[in-house]
Amino acid sequence: MSRGHEIRQQYLEFFATRPGAAHRIVAPAPIVPPDDPTLLFTSAGMVQFKSLYSGAIDPLPYTRAATCQPCLRAGGKGSDLENVGKTLRHHTLFEMLGNFSFGDYFKREAIRWAWEFVTQVLKLKEDRLFPTIFIDDPEAADIWAEETGAHYAPVPLGAKDNFWGPAGETGACGPCSELCYFMGSEEDLAQIKAMFKESKEKALATLAKRIDQEGDVFLEIWNMVFPQFDQQRDGSRPPLKNRGIDTGAGLERMTTVTSWQEGLAGTPYETDLLWPITKAAAELVGVDYVRVLDDPKREHATARLGVNAITDHTRALCFCLAEGITPGNVGRGYVVRRIQRRALRFASLLGQQDPFMERLVEPVLDTMGATYPHLKAQAEFIKKAIRIEEASFLKTRNRGMKLLDEVIAQTKDAQKTTLDGAEAFKLWDTYGFPKDMTKEIAEDEGLVFDESGYAMALAAQKERSREDWKGQQGGAGAEFLEKLEAELGETTFTGYKSTSQSAAKVIAIIGAEGRVDAAREGDEVTVVLNTTPFYAEAGGQIGDTGFLIGSAGENLFEVEDTQKTPKSLYLHRGAVVGLSLKVGDIVRCEVDAQRRMAIRRNHSTTHLLQSALKKYVGSHTSQAGSFCGPDGLRFDFTHPEAIDQATLRKIQHEVNTYILQDAPVITEVMPLDEARSRGAIAPFGEKYGATVRVVQMGEGKDRVSLEFCGGIHLDRTGQAGHFRIVSEGSVAAGIRRIEAVTGERAVALELEEQYGVVNPLQLQLATKGTAVVERVEQLTARIKQLEKLLAQEKSKAATANLDQFVAKAFSLGDCKVAVAHIAELGPNELRTVATTLQQKLGETGVAVAATESDDKKQFVVACGAVALKTHPAGTVVNKIAAAFGGKGGGKPELAQAGAKSDLPLEPVLAKLSQLLA
Ligand code: SER
């Protein structure tokens, strides 16, 4: 079997432990970048480090890092979605290995280590490795020649290939140097070599072309960016504060080439990273999957293509859903929907008409769950979300079928022979009705399919969704919206005090293709009204939902989300549920009042939470983002470390006290200066006009909060009912997040804990109240005592057997080093093992005792009187612990250290002679 899972480990280990490298292993960031609103998804390993390059974080917590980062490249800039399946190298979700430097090492070390890893660890054949460089970077070419044994001079490429970044709109970018692995035939390789002999220039020019055109043959496996510019919004590129290294090495690709070289797997879908999923997908859709290695002519490519896409997409879906990104009509949700529907479309083309996809979740969890346990934790949710979206697809597919029949009839009636491409695209875009199905059916009916019309509509849509994200508005493009703003002006918002409005006029409807006069049942459109009570998402408060209602009281339009343009033109997005909706219609607006009330509870409570945080954690805590929805609230704030339970309890109590005070909530619009002089808190980085809206809770000396805010609040704090913190954690370096619930949810949570946890515990332990805690403490103490006894027994057994380690001792200069690795020893026992072992080795002995339990590692080093002069115990123990990101200290004769890391102990201990040299 190929060894993708092993390569992941080897890479991290290499950069953590290679002498001279010592990178900090950093956990991957979520798929949704926590602090970069210009980015749809985490699309590269460097995303979580943007502020380390720019210098926004100072001092730097570390200057070298290595990660394995799941990246999603679908939707928005640099989407690979449409390529997945068609090529073997593109994925929506893939794992990117990266070593990073922030103002630390630069090109030389990066290139040297890259070469060392691929040739010595992966053992890739050197004559199949082709480096490339940025055309204006002769320095990189020199380094390749000086630092590596590369067979070929690097191929110079232009900015399209070898200038990377930024991720999103701003930040670190710079020239790159890549490594491509040649997967072509021996004959082809011989010709390339001959060409180099004949003329280097000619060979480089030919290779530049081939690398560009034959991406699956010259597989790019390693990209080193040398970020040195800091792209600004205005297009300028000043030097980057902490220039450095940003490596992106695709795990799937490295696994593919390593196993291809070993004759094991020809594509990523056949490696251990994906094969269990591929195999299950093929079985579920009834395809006899012929592996590429058994099919050198690639005759089965078409059948494979669909299965590969389903495989890739299901895995990506699991990652998205595990983070709660569910299919929807805007932003990230829209991308997730497209990923799933693309997979379903392939399944349907391969003949699978029934639901099947949920059954692929287990194979995904089996392959990825050990590395990404959060997937397993969300297994049931993932399955459910996949099931629901699949059912909805199957329904729309039937609806699309009916519409397609109509379009075909109209085409024939008009005596045309070509089925309009734009219509076909609409079927896909609005109803999820697959193009290939449309095409097939049209051709069966004797019609020609208008490929170019389809391609144009697709390109226009792509442009729209790109613009869309830029404007953070969803739906139409930024330019289009500016025009609309200029024509229609600002919407009058009437919703601060009410959730309904008896008459509003529909002044514009925007469909997938632009403005329309009317929309029919089922159409998903955006509606603009002259006046509205629907709150548009802003300041962390989610947009309102509800209905637009006709004169006979019938629901006309379901508002699924409300957004607004920068100039406050309100956009109601959703679906027509009545027969039709026309520009000029007068409608009644009904906001979902219950949902709105829940949102108000959460919003007002974030203000109270902010006050309590300032009181108990400190006045330095400033808001770094928030979200108030109907189900709960999220509040991000600056603070360098975790907040302990006792403080959290105080904060929770404080907020509940504010709620019980039932303080009035007063909103006022006032001049900016006045708001400032009254001491109102303004979120950092926002721009304000001459007058601002200020929300105050409590009056006079009882004032508990005063904040700039445009959101909708409770009338009195008492309406929040109850406040309950659900979690506290870190979202980025220096930023913490509290998640909490209010109102009914908070009460439900308390009850659930009482009846689901506390009462059963009381019964089980046959005791009540705080005695339960005491009892658990006693039990824990007893377990500890027993563990200690066990450890003593173990150490007795261990010290009795130390001669085996002495036998394996190696020399280090004039010293002798012996290593004892014994599982699950306590600190005292570990020390005994170290000192006993040292005594056995004598005065020149360096005894290393190591143990681990879960991800906790402990080391003790004991040195004899001679050894400690050249190899003091503190130095030795720190060298070892540093490989796992830990450190320690002690005396020259005895020192200890600890570390928390998932890296296994054994490989590092096995290489100890190198590490200590
Ligand atoms: N940022 C670069 C990439 O995504 C290297 O990590 O390719």
Image (cartoon, rainbow, N blue to C red):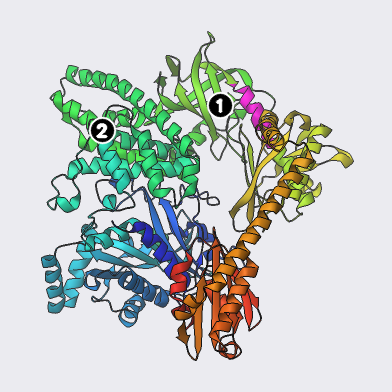
- Residue corresponding to mark 2: 435
Residue placed most toward the observer, 34 or 366: 366
Q: Magenta segment range?
A: 591-603
- Residue corresponding to mark 1: 545
* Res 443 label: none
In this rendering, would 141 be left or right of 587? left
Of mark 1 and mark 2, the one earlier in the sequence is 2
Asked if disc 1 is less than 8 Å from ligand 1, the answer is no
Q: Quadrant of residue 865?
A: bottom right
Q: Secondary structure at mark 2?
A: helix
User: What is the tally of numbered marks visible in this picture?
Assistant: 2
In this rendering, would 670 be left or right of 232? right
Residue 891 lies, in percent from the top left, at 66, 81
The CA distance from mark 1 to mark 2 is 32 Å
- Locate ligand 1 by image quadrant: bottom left
In this rendering, would 452 be left or right of 806? left
Q: Residues within 10 Å of mark 1 (few under 14, many from 20)?
A: many
Q: Secondary structure at mark 1?
A: loop
Q: Quadrant of residue 344?
A: top left
Say if the magenta span includes residue 592.
yes
For the point 29% across and 57% down, the residue is 2
Can I make out residue 681 in this image?
no
Residue placed most toward the observer, 440 or 522: 440
